[in-house]
Image (cartoon, rainbow, N blue to C red):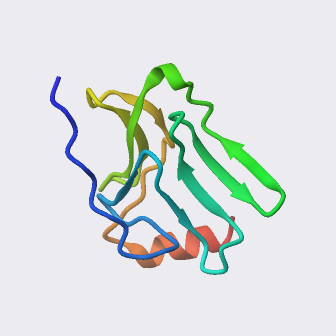
Amino acid sequence: MPTPSNPEQPTRQDRLLANEGLLVGQSISTLDSNYSLTLQTDSNLVLTAPQGAIWSAEITYERNAFDAVMQSDGNFVVRDINNNTLWASGTSLPWRNVGYCRRRLRHL
């Protein structure tokens, strides 16, 4: 299987745009730094808040995560070195219609 190429680095502190991602040990955080999403060195993707971890993808160390990427179709995936998907958000957003996405997210 092909080795995944490194994802593009985030261009914003608080979000990942299409084809941007994190390598193991990297994170992004909200502008106020209260929440952060980290692809940990143990391969787990973890969301933390001031009180500690509030969500985890529950990826085990044996799975050897390589990166976490926001794909151009809106699916956020964690992949291993062989480009296998270890975890996926299962989301698909109409990236060409950003106005629709923002309205939809505001109502959730």
Image position of 32 (left or right of 101)? right
Residue 39 image point, x, y percent? 51, 46
Q: Quadrant of the C terminus?
A: bottom right
Q: Is residue 12 above or below residue 20?
A: below
Residue 53 image point, x, y percent? 74, 49
Who's the residue at 52% across and 73% down the image?
Answer: 14
Residue toward you, 40 or 104:
40
Residue 10 picture quarter: bottom left
Who's the residue at 65% across and 52% down the image?
Answer: 47
Who's the residue at 15% across and 29% down the image?
Answer: 2
Image position of 34 (left or right of 1)? right
Q: Is residue 68 above or below residue 11?
A: above
Image position of 39 (left or right of 74)? right
Q: Quadrant of the N terminus?
A: top left
Residue 36 image point, x, y percent? 62, 61
Residue 11 picture quarter: bottom left
Image position of 7 (left or right of 48)? left
Who's the residue at 42% across and 58% down the image?
Answer: 93
Residue 5 picture quarter: top left
